[in-house]
Amino acid sequence: MTRVDAPWGIDERELEALDRWWRAANYLTVGQIYLTGDPLLHEPLRPEHIKPRLLGHWGTSPGLSLVYAHLNRLIRRHDLDMLYVAGPGHGGPAILANVYLEGTYSEVYPAVSRDAGGMLALFRQFSTPGGVPSHVSVPTPGSIHEGGVLGYALAHAFGAAFDAPELVVACVIGDGEAETGPLEGSWKSIDFLNPARDGAVLPILHLNGYKISGPTVLGRRGHDRVAALLHAHGYEPRIVAGDDPRSVHRSLAEALEASLAEIRAIQHAARGPGPVPDGVPRWPAVILATPKGWTGPEVVDGTRIEGTFRAHQVPLGGVRENPEHLAMLEAWMRSYRPEELFEPDGRLMADLVALAPEGERRMSANPRANGGRDPAALQLPDWRSFAIDVPKPAAERHESTRRLGALMRDVIRAQDTFRLFSPDETNSNRLGAVFEATDRYMMERTDPGDEHVSADGRVMEVLSEHLCHGWLEGYLLTGRHGLFATYEAFAMVSASMTVQHAKWLEEARVQSWRRPVPSLNLLLTSTCWRNDHNGFSHQGPGLIDTVVTQRGSVSRVYFPPDANCLLSVADHCLRSTDYVNLIVIDKQPQFQYLSAEAAAAHCEAGAGIWEWAGNEDARVDDERDEPLPDVVLACIGDIPTMELLAAADLLRVWVPELRFRFVNVVDLMRLPPVTAHPHGTSAAEFAALFTDDVDVVMAFHGYPNAVHGLLHGQADTDRFHVHGYREQGTTTTPFDMVVLNEMSRFHLAADAVQRATRRPAGAAALLEYCDEMLTRHHDWIRLHLEDLPEVTDWVWHD
């Protein structure tokens, strides 16, 4: 694509108007950091006008407001559908200032009105108890990006642009953020942006030179070297640099106009009647280099502030106690000449009001940033049509995730607002049926040996969990649907993103104006119990613990034991909104247990007694005259279910007088009390599953402490004895993994007879047999390099 270099002038009147908007935003930014009184400086500042705790980030704010003002100009001139993603999230006061100037903030929060009283409310609420945080976040209209953890802004921006052909997403990237791994990986997103059907992303790399206490890497490189880096990533960068406001205004206006012209030229070439250009076009980018803390105090107490790391947060401290600093603050704020910006009653002057785009064209009011513009409901086929016939339980093995792949194939066929995200693992995770409906998505060339790779695909494969996760989040927050499938151990790479998204959803629930968004659905497969061939590095169920620590209003964790339960759970999760749904199931052939009808009922209940697997119908407790088992067997997860069923089989053969109940849990959040989680159980429901006082031997997919933590608040939890993953792993056989972690059928059966309320006949013989089998297993796998036939050939006996 030929670079567009046509000049775009900006006359003095327009330049002056832009500068006044920028000054107004800077004034409001400083006011939010410092003031709790006298918002328009109608009188000299006094100590009581200053907040007792000064919090916030000034250094990046002038640059964020500068970009905001110029994007508004671009929107008005070209009637753009545009979003603003602020990577330097702690520049929150700048974005709040601009949203307030646009009028959207007062529409969403009427108490923060467009007058002196509302301005004071805006100032007082910033970074104070009961107010708003110091970063761009859920309460900020127009935001789809939480700035709490750096690195995800560009991925979110591209996710928002997918399948939104009219949208332009401007993404401001701080030079500190640019040092993170996720952001560095995100530059590759243009290889997955199709100008024929997607929108555009305009990265604006803001070089102000410093992080919180030192220089940034890119800030110390020459501008040409930074431009060369972006050029190597496939962008066509423009450099805007300087510390003279008028010069920077002119250069930035021209750079943005030229960048938009290039975007339109790229899209026209891809969407026009002529032949579509091959390969990835060179999308534009802007490098904006301005001083840290621009227009703030230059020198304080003999130390340089502007243009250094010292401008990062609060340039003037101790303002209440230090009269000199108080005077400097007042001079700083008056330097913006607020009397030229606001009427005496605090209203923004009419000519500045006219600079904001109208209605939904305001970036702060764009519905794409609030659940999407006319979001389409996900069209899901009846999952039962993909179900497996199960004539008898635990008799046949199937790869359960293949059935989910078939369901997603039909979901993709039904609509163009669903994408599958996976780090090069779609086939490995047995989801390859989707390639009957679509391809892997890549804009780069395709070679003869490639399979299912095209610029029209809806499967997003890239070897970056951060990028997959971030793309999906941006896609969901703008109203579309998808699923992220990854190996279980590697889900921890992007675990902080899962946490941040959960926190976003938690906060969105208390913002009545925020519309629901499709849930974040995470499928973990290639699990710890079946990564025996890859070894210890691939064995780790830690994301389960991460998700269960999030608030119950958003966290959901499911362990379907077979294909039909997986289909039922997936159908529920894909239809849901405002949750983080974690689905854990392995991809290897596994036993099938429940018919479609039984699976639907079991998953709806979340947990249930499998009467066909238990053996508790004969003994009666003399005192209470009600049937009670001697021990309860409980399982959560596919491999735990198989091992516990094999243990039950041993109990029925060796100790037939033992009465045991068999409980399977699909929804992990059924374990806590209902007071701790919406899916939790009442005391009566919990007792109906696990009794009041009988010991429970539980096989769990993840770390045992996760279960113990969830059980807190239930009655007599000391009776729960949880076998799970205990960080014992290596390259070994599948069965040896459960042996190493003491979750094998032999460990479970032995524990059951030892925990039972009575010692049945045959118990000693069973314990001796279990010990012998564990010894035999140890020797067998080292000699034969595979598991015992008694293990590999086992099936459930009626």
Image (spheres, helix red, strand yellow):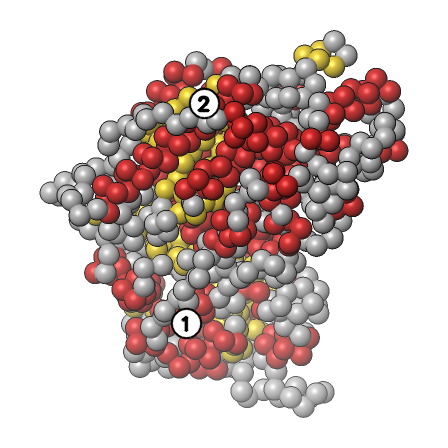
Q: Which amino acid does label 2 sit on?
A: Ser
Upstream in the sequence, badge 1 or badge 2? Answer: 2
What SS does tag 2 mark? Answer: helix
Residue 568 shows which numbered tag?
Answer: 1
Q: Residue at x 29, y 50 (%)?
A: 197
For the question of whether residue 36 can be seen, the reply is yes
Q: Which amino acid does label 1 sit on?
A: Ser
Specify the quadrant that holds the C terminus.
bottom left
Residue 332 x/y as whole percent: 73, 22
Residue at 74%, 41% in the rendered image: 346
Question: Which residue is at 67% across, 12% downward?
Answer: 304
| Residue wearing tag 2 | 251
Considering depth in this image, is 233 or 784 the residue closer to the camera? 233
Up-down relation of residue 730 to residue 659 (above or below): above
Depth-wise, is mark 1 or mark 2 nearer the camera?
2
Residue 384 place in picture, x, y as percent: 34, 77
